[in-house]
Amino acid sequence: MSGFVFSEKPITIESGEGATLVADDGTEYLDFGASYACTPLGHSHPAVTDAVQEQAAELTYVQASYPVETRTETYEKLAALAPGDLDNVWLCNSGTEANEAAMKFARAATGEEKIVATKRAFHGRTLGALAMTWKQKYKAPYEPLAGGIEFVEYGDAAALAETVDENTAAVFLEPVQGEGGIHPAAVEYLQSAREVTAEAGAALVLDEIQTGVGRTGTLWACEQADVVPDVLTTAKGIANGLPMGATLCADWIAEDFGDHGSTFSGGPVVCAAANATLETVVEEDLPAHAAAVGDDLRERLQAAADDHDLPVRDVRGSGLMVGIEVKRGANRILRDLAIDQAVLALPAGRSVVRLLPPLVVDEADAERFVDAFVEVLSG
Ligand SMILES: Cc1ncc(COP(=O)(O)O)c(C=O)c1O
């Protein structure tokens, strides 16, 4: 008997600490993928471990209709940390669910059906969120998906303005496209998305599932464009590896959201992990740290590519969300990095090596990654 959805890697992980994962044969891997940005504080961070253990011993689970101090604290923290006045918090278990809720809430609040998404977007894998995802490979076997979705070119403000109209419920955007290849949006693009949605009475939904919780150098990537959406979705790193998604909504969305729910919404143990994670991210100013180390990492990568004449087309990104576009298959490079150099990273499509390390990595870790990358690409 075996799991059948994920293809398994030939490495069995036994433990982790900080940016290091330890395999059953004792090999220590430098983790520059953080399992798709899920451990901003690094592996097995004591603040999260303690919070989880304490909460599990006191009350492991009670459904969200019963107020629990730990969950109330999560609501308050997220509302306080959210950009603008996105004070209304829906908690769920994943990024996909956070976006699915955002689709439903936007349709209910506007009474409209049309949702505008972008080419190369990734918003999740349920039949609603998947409908807003661009890649055919993910979608084709499962059709029909949710209807009413129109795609526009990412970054093209004129195309967006032409497509958004009074029948639009929402525009969904990633401030930096992750799965699509690490493409940061221009500040002006996000600002014009804000303007056209406001004019049309549509919701601007920013999907910060990968960019959020400090990854791009600010707590939320939209802060860098000075844009406050109507809905912000987040997940991945929010509870440092425990499953949580959140949909943060403006009053006008929350006032008329329809009827929604989920059994495990805001479970106390996951909320305890989220509270400890958010507290640590803020107290240790990890977004600023991510900005500094990310700049250093991209500079080192570009310099190494130039000095060693590596087959690299582009180095781009924001904070510790970095894409290296390569002239040969990214998967082969990732395999060699893992097997020969004990360094883990991720793909973003066939030609981009994606780096989403824990936000606690430092310049020495960046140097180690770059050295390993040079070794593999010059080999
Ligand atoms: C931007 C974005 N949105 C949504 C999702 C889906 O999140 P999850 O896998 O937690 O359902 C992801 C996951 O990679 C993502 O990167």
Image (cartoon, rainbow, N blue to C red):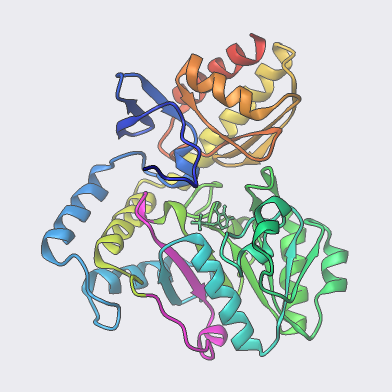
309 relative position to 89: left or right: right
Q: Nearer the viewer, residue 113 or 82?
A: 113
Percent position of residue 361, x then y: 43, 32
Picture quadrant where residue 128 is located: bottom right
Percent position of residue 266, x then y: 33, 70
Above or below residue 100? Residue 177 is above
Q: Nearer the viewer, residue 293 or 315?
A: 315
Specify whether residue 185 is in view: no
Above or below residue 173? Residue 338 is above
Most extreme residue toward the left is 57
257 relative position to 150: left or right: left
Q: Nearer the viewer, residue 356 or 28?
A: 28
User: What segment carries the magenta color?
Assistant: 239-262
Above or below residue 313? Residue 254 is below
Which residue occupies 78% across, 75% down?
196
Percent position of residue 354, x then y: 60, 36
31 relative position to 250: left or right: left
The quarter of the rendering in which ligand 1 is drawn is bottom right
Above or below residue 232? Residue 312 is above
On whether residue 97 falls in the magenta region, the answer is no
Most extreme residue toward the top is 379
How many marks can you see?
0
Which residue occupies 66% across, 88% down?
110
Which residue occupies 84% across, 59% down?
156
